[in-house]
Image: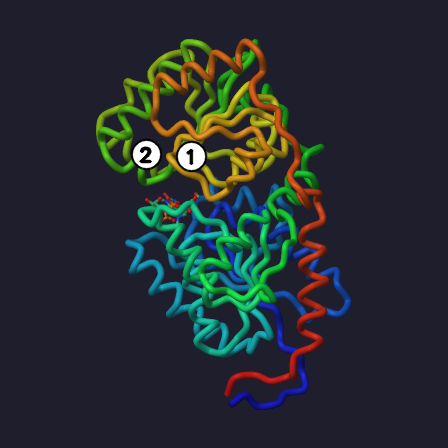
Amino acid sequence: MGKLRDSPGVILCVVGARPNYMKMAPLLRAFRAHSALPPAVLVHTGQHYDPMLNDRLFEDLALPRPDINLEVGSGTHALQSAEVMRRFEPVVDEHRPCCVVVVGDVNSTLACSLVAAKKGVPVAHVEAGLRSFDRAMPEEINRILTDQISDLLYTTERSAHHNLAREGIPAERMHFAGNVMIDSLLFHRNRAAPAAQTLARAGKQGFGAGGYGVVTLHRPSNVDEPEALRESLCILRAVSERLPLVCALHPRTMARIEAFGFSTILDTPRLAVLPPQGYLEMLGLMAGATLVLTDSGGMQEETTALSVPCLTMRENTERPITVEQGTNTLVGRDRALILRLADEILAAGGKRGRAPELWDGRAAERIAAHVAGWLATRPVSIHG
Ligand code: UD1
C-alpha cells in the first residue's frame, strides 16, 4: 500500500535516443511553464551518446542538459534494456515521482516504463498507439508493451485509438493530443539552417543547387543484412542519376557499409554522404528538398508537416495518417516503383497532402494541461 506524503513528488521525463529529443523538448517546456505541475526532472538513459546523435540535438532544440544521465551506451537489446532498468530503478526510488513520462518507441521507453509500472508509479506514454503490425521491428514490441503498462496514453492520430482498443486498453486512458514532434518542427522552423550553408560546411559547396533529395537509412531491416543494404544503396545510386542526393547516415549504417565493403556503391559525385546532422540542419535540408527517401519514423511525419514528398523504404508504417493525408508513400525496396515515383515527383511535384488534425504546434501544452488535471484528481500517495 502507498503511504501519504505532503510533497507532490516530481515528474520524471525520460529520453534515450535521438528521436526522443524533439518530442521531449516541447513537453519539458510545457511542464515547466505550467504552474500547477510539480518540477520536471529530465533523465537521459545514455542509449545515444555520440555528439552528432546527442549533444548537437540538445543544443539545437534548446533542451536543457539532463538532470541525470544513466550512461548506459550501446549493447544487445537485452543488455541495453536491462542496464537501463538497473540504473533507472534507484532514480525512481530516490525521486519518488508522481509520474514518469516516456516518449516514442525506443528501448529506453519500454525499459523505464517497466521500472515505473512495477513500482506503482503512473506512466504517461506520449505517441501511444502507433502500430506497424510488424513484430520483427524492435520498436513495435516496445510500443505494444509500453502502452499496456501506461496509465495515460497520448496519441498523435485517431487510428491509434482503434489499435489500443483492439489490445484491450480502456478508452478513458487514451487522449488524442496531437503531435509533439510537430510542435518542435513548427517552433524551430524559422531557425532552420539553409541547406546550401549545411552543404558548404560539409565541404559540398554548390551540391544540389538545382534541386536535391534527402536520404536517411538506419533500420535493421535495410542495413543489417548485406543483400538488403546492397540493394538499398544501389537504389540510392539509381535515384541519384535523376536527382542529386544528400545522405545523412547513422553511425550504424556507416559501420555496416564499411564492414560489408560497400563504400564504392556510394562513390559518385551525385551522392553527398554526410554524418548525422543537427536538428536545424535536417530541418533545413528537408524543407528545401524535392523529395525525401527514408526509413525513419519521425521523418515520415516531418515531411508531411513540411509538405515535401516522402518515399518510405519500408513495407509498413505505424503512421498511416502520413500516407492517407500527408505526403508519404511506402515503397519498400521496390527499385522500379521508387524510380517511377521519383520521376513523377520530378515532373509534377508529387503528393502535397495536408496537415493532420491537431498537428498544430500545441500538443505539449495540451498534454501538460491534461497531466495537471489528472494529477489533481489523484490521492497523494507514493509507493512504500
Ligand atoms: C535507435 C532506436 C530506433 C531509432 C533510432 C534513431 C531502438 C530499438 N531503436 O536505433 O527506434 O529510430 O535509435 O537513431 O531503441 N551507435 C553509435 N553511437 C550512438 C548510439 C549508437 O555509434 O550514440 C551505434 C552503435 O554501434 C550501436 C548501434 O548504433 O550498437 C545501434 O544503436 P541503438 O541505440 O541500439 O539503436 P539505433 O539503431 O540507434
Which residue: 34% across, 23% down? 334
Q: Nearer the viewer, residue 313 or 212?
A: 313
Q: CA distance from mark 2 to mark 1?
A: 8 Å
Residue at 37% x, 35% y is: 315
Identify residue type, mark 2.
Answer: Asn
Of labels 2 and 1, earlier in sequence is: 2
Q: Is residue 202 above or below residue 92?
A: above
Label 1 within 8 A of ligand 1 by Cβ:
no
Instruction: Using the image, determine if residue 34 lies above or below residue 180.
Output: below
10 Å crowding of disc 1: few (<14), some (14-19), many (20+): many
Q: Residue 53's spot in the image, x, y percent?
A: 47, 42
The reply to whether discs 2 and 1 touch (Cβ–Cβ < 8 Å) is yes
Which percent across, then down, holds residue 73?
A: 37, 54
Residue 26 located left or right of residue 149: right
As drawn, 377 above or below 108: below
- Residue position for label 1: 295
Q: In the figure, is residue 301 to the left or right of 134?
A: right
Q: Nearer the viewer, residue 235 or 193?
A: 235
Q: Position of residue 149 (x, y in %)?
A: 46, 68
Q: In the rendering, which numbered label is found on residue 222?
A: 2
Q: Is residue 112 left or right of residue 254?
A: right
